[in-house]
Structures are given as C-alpha cells and as structure tokens.
Image (spheres, rainbow, N blue to C red):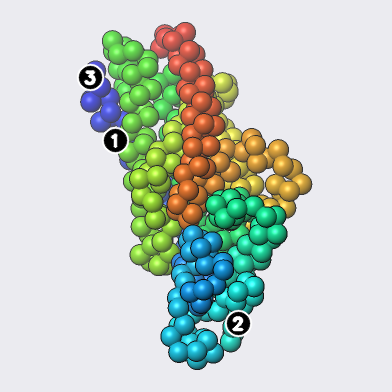
C-alpha cells in the first residue's frame, strides 16, 4: 500500500464515522452557540475602544502602544464629544477619566488605566510598562469583560485537541482491529513510522477543517472576530492538534482496555485542562491558578490559550514561543514512546 493510498483510506475512515463526525464537528458549534447566546456583550471585548485624549498628554506614547485603545483627538469640546459618542471616555493627564455613561467598554478602559498607573509607580521605563501591560492582559485574562471570548478560545483549543480521538482510534484500528484496513497496513512493507505520519496528516486535515469551520461560524453568525494574526494562529493550532494526536496515540498503546474507555479518559483530560484554563470563566480560572500556581506551569492548555491570546490580541509572539518550547518536546516524547511500542509489535501478536 502506498503512502497516498493509506492517506486516502485514513480520510475516508475519519469522515464516515458518524459519531466522531458529530462530536468533532457539530458539538463545538453547539457549545459555542450556547456561550454566545447566554453571555452578554458578545463580540465587543476584543474591539478597540475609542477614547479621547489631548495630543500633549504625557502618557500618550504609552497609550498609543496598547492595542485595546483607539486614541482620538477632541473635535469640539470634551463634553460635547462624549455626548455625541465620538469616544467612550476622555483620558486626563493624570490618567483619570471623564465619561457621560458607563458600560463594559468604559470598565475595560478603567482597567487599563489603573494598570498603567500601577506600573508607572514602579518607575520602570515605557517599553517595560507596555510589555507588562500585555503580560497582565494575557495571563490574567483582563481583556474580556464578559468572558465569552475566553470561552470561545477554549472551545477552539478543545476542538483542536479532539484529534486525540483519532489518535486513539487510528492506533487501536491497526493494532487490535480485524478490518481489512488493519490487515493491509500491517502486511504492507511501509514502516510503522509511515503509518503514524499518515494518521497524523489525515487527522490534521479533518480537524483543521473542523477548527476553521468553528472560527468562521463564530465570526459570521455572531460577529465575533477571534483571529487577527492568521499565520501565527495557524502555527499555534497545528501544534495543538499535533499534541492531541500524540496524546491519543499514547493512550492507545499504554492502556489495555477498549477504545471507548481510552477516548473517555482522553476526553476527561481535555475537559479538565480546558476547565482550569478558561472554559469555566476568567474568574474561576484566576482563582484556581492563584491557589494552585503549579497549574500554570504544567497545564498545556494554559500555554495554548496564552499563545492564542498573545498573537491575536497583543500581537505578541513571546507566548507562542513559550508554547512551542513546552508543547513540541512533550509531543515528540509521546510520539516517540508510541513509535517504540509499535516497532516491538506485529499484527500476529494480537
């Protein structure tokens, strides 16, 4: 069997599995719809907030670098501009605000200004202030007033990690299945590393489609633009999907039970990781990570979420680099263990 033929069979197997098709494709859409309907202020948190400022304001250099603020000069006078909704708030020289009404966007501006004040009191330079602002917004999730965007990013990560199901099913089908596919794959002269590469490629294609469908659905149905840096986001999601695949493959070779039990365990792990990194809401996540700071170090989805937030909100790739340094070695270790196991076994052993 050639590589392309094996890839074709893998794709057909994944698409024809109706149960997997539902959970991998439609369930994330249903979950996203639920969060978008029940959460208030959908789609507003990631947009820049218009604020008025005098061109001689001593803080203007710092404020210009914050992507959440869209600075506008005064047209007539401050009070008139505010009443005409030219901007949500006017920023004074001392970083206080003038407003005519308060809403979630005004609270975002206040949150930003409070952090700038605190950071200025440390006497660090402006470059470091901006760097720490981005870090504070990404790690503590303060950029989202309603929390819906944070939950949507968690759903994107969850959908990408659903490659775990395919990783388990693919290895189980080869090692323990009695299908013609299993017999042909193991009777063929292809190396077992090629089996794995075929499985990874086909899974990436199908899961990539599911993730793209979710992002486009949220954008065009609910008007929420999650992705602004396409290339960095593409790299991030590919790495997340690869991690999910290798996690599933390891579960397949390390647990002596049926496919259903392995996937149930894998699903439990994915949900646990997502619940502690954003899907339960930013408040719950911050409470958990404050009381158990070790979670920030060991939970892979926190690295994934910070990377997505960093590249799409602050245009900062530092968190993507941190994710790469943590997730790729971890994934390669899981992949290596799976490959070693497969090389020691033949179809007749089962």
Disc 1 crowd rating (10 Å Cα; few below 14, some 14-19, many 20+) is few
Q: Residue at x 23, y 19 (%)?
A: 2
What kind of element bears circle 1? helix
Q: Position of residue 14 (x, y in %)?
A: 35, 37
Q: Which mark is residue 98?
A: 2
Q: In the image, is residue 238 above or below residue 287?
A: above
Is residue 171 rendered to the left or right of residue 10?
right
* N-term-proximal mark, 2 vs 3: 3
Q: Nearer the viewer, residue 294 or 197?
A: 294
Q: Nearer the viewer, mark 1 or mark 2?
A: 2
Q: Position of residue 278 (x, y in %)?
A: 60, 52
Q: Which mark is residue 12?
A: 1
Q: Spot the residue most to the right.
A: 291
Is residue 175 rendered to the left or right of residue 277?
left
Q: In the image, is residue 31 above or below residue 272?
A: below
Is residue 187 rendered to the left or right of residue 177?
left
Q: Residue at x 30, y 35 (%)?
A: 11
Work out how far the residue at label 2 is from the one at label 3, CA to CA, in angstroms: 69 Å
Disc 2 crowd rating (10 Å Cα; few below 14, some 14-19, many 20+) is some
Q: In the image, is residue 38 above or below residue 24?
A: below
Whether residue 284 is visible, yes or no, is no
Q: Position of residue 128 (x, y in %)?
A: 58, 50
Work out how far the residue at label 1 is from the one at label 2, CA to CA, in angstroms: 60 Å
* N-term-proximal mark, 1 vs 2: 1
Q: Which mark is residue 2?
A: 3
Disc 3 crowd rating (10 Å Cα; few below 14, some 14-19, many 20+) is few
What kind of element bears circle 3? loop
Q: Residue at x 40, y 67 (%)?
A: 223
Q: Nearer the viewer, mark 3 or mark 1?
A: 3
């Amino acid at each position: 069997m050639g590589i392309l033929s094996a890839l074709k069979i893998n794709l057909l197997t994944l698409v024809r599995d109706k149960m997997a098709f539902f959970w991998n494709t439609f369930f994330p859409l249903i979950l996203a719809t639920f969060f978008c309907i029940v959460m208030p202020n959908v789609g507003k948190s990631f947009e820049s907030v218009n604020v008025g400022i005098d061109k001689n304001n001593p803080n203007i250099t710092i404020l210009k670098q914050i992507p959440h603020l869209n600075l506008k000069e005064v047209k007539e006078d401050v009070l008139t501009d505010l009443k005409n909704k030219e901007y949500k708030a006017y920023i004074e020289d001392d970083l206080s605000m003038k407003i005519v009404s308060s809403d979630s966007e005004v609270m975002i501006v206040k949150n930003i200004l409070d952090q700038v004040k605190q950071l200025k009191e440390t006497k660090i330079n402006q470059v470091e202030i901006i760097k720490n602002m981005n870090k504070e917004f990404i790690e503590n999730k303060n950029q989202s007033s309603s929390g819906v965007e944070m939950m949507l990013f968690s759903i994107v990560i969850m959908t990408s990690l659903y490659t775990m199901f395919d990783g388990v099913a693919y290895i189980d089908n080869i090692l323990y299945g009695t299908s013609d596919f299993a017999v042909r794959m193991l009777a063929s002269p292809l190396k077992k590393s090629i089996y794995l590469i075929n499985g990874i490629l086909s899974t990436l294609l199908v899961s990539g489609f599911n993730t793209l469908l979710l992002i486009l659905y949220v954008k065009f149905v609910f008007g929420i633009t999650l992705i602004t840096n396409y290339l960095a986001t593409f790299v991030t999601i590919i790495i997340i999907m690869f991690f999910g695949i290798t996690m599933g493959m390891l579960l397949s070779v390390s647990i002596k039970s049926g496919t259903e039990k392995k996937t149930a365990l894998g699903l439990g792990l994915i949900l646990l990781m997502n619940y502690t990194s954003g899907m339960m809401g930013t408040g719950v996540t911050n409470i958990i990570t404050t009381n158990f700071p070790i979670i920030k170090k060991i939970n892979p989805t926190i690295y994934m979420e910070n990377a997505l937030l960093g590249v799409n909100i602050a245009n900062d790739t530092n968190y993507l680099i941190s994710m790469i340094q943590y997730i790729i070695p971890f994934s390669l270790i899981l992949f290596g263990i799976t490959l070693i196991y497969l090389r020691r076994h033949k179809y007749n052993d089962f």
